[in-house]
Image: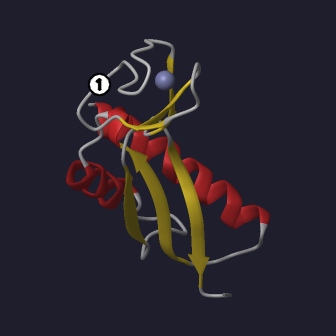
């Protein structure tokens, strides 16, 4: 399952960071989830809740922030809303378009009891 392996790697990072900073309890984990990652937020939260038991993140809430797909035309520099899956520039018709956001899946912040 896609979401389970992602939840596991997120948890690994959270636990690693908590240990490094001497944190005993994690309260909240903010994660940016790009639209292009095909991750189902509910499913990711569910998986995280399953595997967090017995770790420093046991009481942690996963806070997911969706990141819409956006791009940049490499030819005219136009910023593109790529939510419609338009992979050519509406201004200059160039297909030389680069996805600039929406592919990420990263931890934004980790909130702990220590503040
Ligand atoms: Zn363009």
Q: Is mark 1 within 8 Å of ligand 1?
A: no
Is 51 or 31 nearer to us in this picture?
A: 31
- Which x, y percent locates residue 109? 59, 66
Report the side of 23 relative to 107 (left or right). right
Is 80 or 107 nearer to us in this picture?
A: 80
Figure check: 53 above or below 26:
above
Specify the quadrant that holds the C terminus: bottom right
Is 99 or 57 nearer to us in this picture?
A: 99
Report the side of 17 relative to 94 (left or right). right
Report the side of 89 relative to 12 (left or right). left
Residue, disc 1? 86
Quarter of image, res 6: top left
Quarter of image, res 77: top right
Is 82 or 16 nearer to us in this picture?
A: 82
Figure check: 46 above or below 58:
above
- Which x, y percent locates residue 1? 26, 31
- Residue under the point 41% across and 60% down: 52
Answer few, some or many: residues within 10 Å of disc 1's Cα (few below 14, many 20 plus, some between 14 and 19): few
- Residue under the point 57% across and 25% down: 76
Look at the numbered disc 1 and give the secondary structure of its residue: loop
Report the side of 51 relative to 38 (left or right). right
Residue lying at the far top of the rendered structure: 95
- Which x, y percent locates residue 91? 41, 27
- Which x, y percent locates residue 94? 45, 13
């Amino acid at each position: 399952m896609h979401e389970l392996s992602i939840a596991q790697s997120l948890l690994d990072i959270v636990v690693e960071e908590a240990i490094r900073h001497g944190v005993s309890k994690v309260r909240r984990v903010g994660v940016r989830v790009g639209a292009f990652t095909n991750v189902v937020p509910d499913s990711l939260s569910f998986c995280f809740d399953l595997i967090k038991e017995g770790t420093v993140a046991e009481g942690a809430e996963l806070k997911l922030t969706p990141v819409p797909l956006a791009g940049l035309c490499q030819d005219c520099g136009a910023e593109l809303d790529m939510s419609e899956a338009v992979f050519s520039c509406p201004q200059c018709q160039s297909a030389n378009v680069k996805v600039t956001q929406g592919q990420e899946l990263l931890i934004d912040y980790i909130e702990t009891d220590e503040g």
